[in-house]
Amino acid sequence: MSAHSHVDGQLPHEPEKATLEGRNKVLGFWLFLGAEVVLFGTLFSAFLALRDKVGDGNPTADELFNLSTVAIATFILLTSSLTSVFATQAMHAGKKNAMIGWLIITVLFGLGFLGLEIYEFKEYVHEGHGFTTSAFSSSFYTLVGFHGAHVAFGVLWISIIIGQVLKKGLTVVTAPKIYVSGLYWHFIDVVWVFIFTVVYLMGKVG
């Protein structure tokens, strides 16, 4: 049976690892995530070094941050991580339609998160917290904006994969793409937990 002729329920238990190409994709993606950890680690270090460099008359983190908005955004993104898990579980069970449903919900949550982040940034700029206002604002927008760009990429990537599955079905070719996109989504969720803690909570408590 060819890779493309599998139908729902006839896939191996872990279809993402059923072929050498699939296993190589998963391994390669773990290496990519390792590089991403180093990159985000550098941005976190820069933010921690510059977070007190506010400048005279500019809003501080404590004055600026509205934790209720950020908490809602955090809840949305963490919930999307759960729906991503459900999508992977549906894939392993060979339930294509359920998997697509969970992926669509994940994308919608991702879009909701981005909408809140754009709203948040507009509020900050309105309050005099622009990208070049201070070293603190530059490091803040670089770190949080870089993460937001990752979320936007994830939304686009998962949307493309949904289209591929609708066209080609759930196969040992499409399964590794679904699996690694799930890993990517969990990674950006974990990064956000660190951002929420280091940037927002620590910013509020000083």
Image (cartoon, helix red, strand yellow):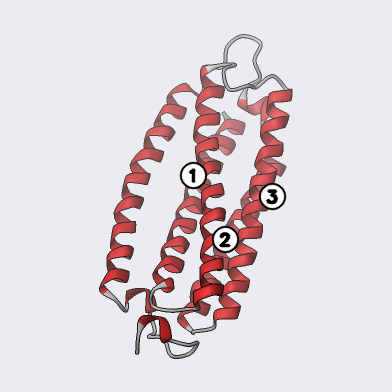
Residue 68 located left or right of residue 166: right
Q: Which numbered marker is on residue 159?
A: 2
The quadrant of the picture occupied by the N terminus is bottom left
What percent of the width, then of the height, locates residue 119?
A: 71, 38
- Secondary structure of the residue carrying tag 1 is helix
| Amino acid, disc 2 | Ser
At a point 43% along the width and 73% down the height, the residue shown is 175
How far is the residue under mark 2 from the one under mark 1?
26 Å
How far is the residue under mark 1 from the one under mark 3?
16 Å
Residue 28 located left or right of residue 45: left
Q: Mark 1 points at which residue?
A: 194
Dot placed on the residue nearer the N-terminal end, 1 or 3: 3
Nearer to us in this view, 73 or 84: 84
Residue 111 located left or right of residue 21: right
At a point 55% along the width and 54% down the height, the residue shown is 156
What percent of the width, then of the height, locates residue 96?
A: 55, 80
Nearer to us in this view, 30 or 62: 30
- Secondary structure of the residue carrying tag 2 is helix
Q: Nearer the viewer, mark 2 or mark 1?
A: 2
Quadrant in the rendering for residue 127? top right
| Amino acid, disc 3 | Ile
At a point 69% along the width and 45% down the height, the residue shown is 115
Q: Mark 3 points at which residue?
A: 72
- Secondary structure of the residue carrying tag 3 is helix
At a point 49% along the width and 75% down the height, the residue shown is 168
